Image (cartoon, grey):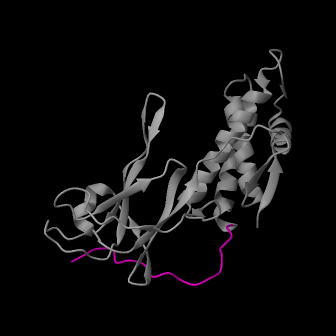
């Protein structure tokens, strides 16, 4: 399932459910611009939670790219590929080697020697794991792509990143947000309300109610996930001997 909500509908839901008066100008404690920014922020939080719950609703598959033909550093048993600036999070990494697909398992780079051959002279082997090496870095106002490790090192084949794209905030009232379920929409609204109530006095009841709704929606979001049908994909081995 999937539902669409315009920014107007999001603002109405926050105002009605949270008793928040929203408008333009200094006479309003909560301006439309401020609440719009919080709605976009809460929506991204909802996307992140969706990924953590291993839902693929917001995931986008990238194009196939060639695996690096050189190791990350001399003697390393892994290679590195770019973490695109347009990718907010990495949902999955697939590889295609010798005509066969694998879904790589994620790991912490600290455990690199537990998931690939320890000898620096080890030959090229089919990758089984991936890990973030470095998220995007920033120098003043310029961002630099991050890096993802693919291990063990493989000198041939292709890979594909499946990512959660960076969100472009919606500021036009007629433009739409898309949610996997009504629960996800309500979770987002409740998150915005919890933020507005931290600025207001005597709002404990509304805050508690919003927190309760978040808890209920959080539990339901996993139960209402849309599972796409299709073929299965062979999982990589967890560890090299």
Q: Position of residue 165 (x, y in %)?
A: 59, 53
Q: Is residue 62 left or right of residue 227?
A: left
* Residue 42, picture quadrant: top right
Residue 124 on image: x %, y % = 24, 74
**Relative vertical location of residue 25 with respect to residue 109 in this rendering, above or below:** above
Prevailing secondary structure class for the magenta stretch in the rendered image: loop
The residue depicted at 67 percent of the width and 46 percent of the height is 43
Q: Magenta stretch: residue 227 in it?
A: yes
Quarter-wise, where is residue 157 in the image? bottom left
Q: Is residue 196 magenta?
A: no
Q: Name which quarter of the figure residue 231 lies in.
A: bottom right
Residue 149 drawn at (x, y percent) = 34, 59
Please report the residue visible at 56 percent of the width from the left and 61 percent of the height from the top: 53
The magenta segment is 225-241
Residue at 37 percent across and 67 percent down: it is 67
x and y, in percent, of residue 232 in the image: 54, 83
């Amino acid at each position: 399932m999937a539902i669409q909500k315009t920014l107007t509908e999001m603002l109405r839901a926050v105002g009605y459910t949270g008793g928040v008066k929203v408008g333009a100008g200094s006479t309003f404690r909560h301006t439309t611009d401020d609440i719009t920014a919080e709605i976009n922020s809460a929506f991204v939080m909802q996307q992140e939670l969706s990924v953590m719950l291993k839902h693929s609703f917001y995931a986008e598959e990238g194009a196939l790219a060639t695996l690096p033909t050189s190791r990350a550093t001399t003697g390393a048993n892994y290679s590195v590929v770019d973490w695109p600036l347009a990718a907010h999070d990495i949902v999955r990494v697939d590889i295609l080697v010798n005509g066969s697909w694998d879904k790589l398992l994620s790991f912490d780079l600290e455990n690199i020697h537990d998931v690939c051959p320890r000898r620096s002279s080890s030959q090229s082997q089919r990758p089984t794991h991936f890990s973030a090496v470095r998220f995007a870095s920033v120098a003043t106002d310029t961002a630099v792509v991050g890096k993802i490790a693919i291990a063990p090192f493989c000198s041939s084949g292709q890979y594909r990143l499946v990512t959660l794209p960076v969100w472009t905030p919606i500021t036009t009232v007629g433009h739409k947000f898309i949610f996997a379920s009504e629960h996800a929409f309500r979770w987002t609204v409740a998150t915005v309300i919890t933020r507005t109530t931290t600025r207001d006095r005597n709002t404990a009841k509304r805050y508690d109610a919003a927190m309760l709704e978040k808890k209920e929606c959080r539990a339901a979001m996993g139960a209402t996930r849309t599972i796409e049908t299709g073929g299965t994909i062979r999982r990589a081995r967890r560890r090299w001997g």
